[in-house]
Amino acid sequence: MFELTENIYTILSTNTALQTALGAGYATKIAPLIIENQDETPPFIVFEIHAAGVAGKDGVKNYTLIVRTFDVDHDSALQLAEKVEAAFMAEATLKFGFISAKPILDENYQIHIEQIYKLKK
């Protein structure tokens, strides 16, 4: 799953629309959830990957990808989430299937958009 985490990071960090939206230091504003920095100043993106079952006869394994985009307000977080979705849909090596998205207000009163994707590898 480490390789898949690296692939997701690469897709997001090399997307020029996301680089522009995240601004200076964009590479440090994208991270797997396990190294999430609660003190990070928006905008930033965190993601997590969950394996869904075992690989099939063809060796393909299903995964669930959860991406959270944080920004200073709902509209900005939503625009960032749309850029994430566009980056995934443009990706040729991994196939992402969009499942859902919803806004969340966390206990620190930070708003973020949570997106859920399915993917196979």
Image: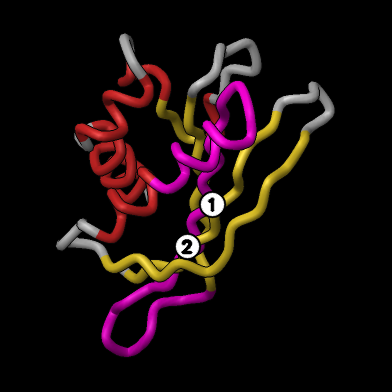
* Chosen colour scheme: secondary structure
What number is the disc on residue 76? none
What is the three-letter code of the residue carrying label 1? Ile
| Image quadrant assignment for residue 13 | top left
Residue 61 within the segment the image draws in magenta: yes
Question: Which residue in the structure is indicated by mark 1?
Answer: 66
Query: As drawn, is 44 to the left or to the right of 23?
Result: right
Q: How many marks?
A: 2
Query: As drawn, is 77 to the left or to the right of 14?
Result: right
Residue 65 within the segment the image draws in magenta: yes
Residue 75: x, y in percent? 57, 36
- Name which residue lies at 49% across and 22% down: 43
What number is the disc on residue 117? 2
* Residues drawn in magenta: 53-82
Residue farthest along the right direction in this orientation? 107
Residue 22: x, y in percent? 37, 22
SS for callout 1: strand
SS for callout 2: strand
What is the three-letter code of the residue carrying label 2? Tyr
Q: Name above or below for residue 99 compared with residue 21.
A: below
| Image quadrant assignment for residue 72 | top right
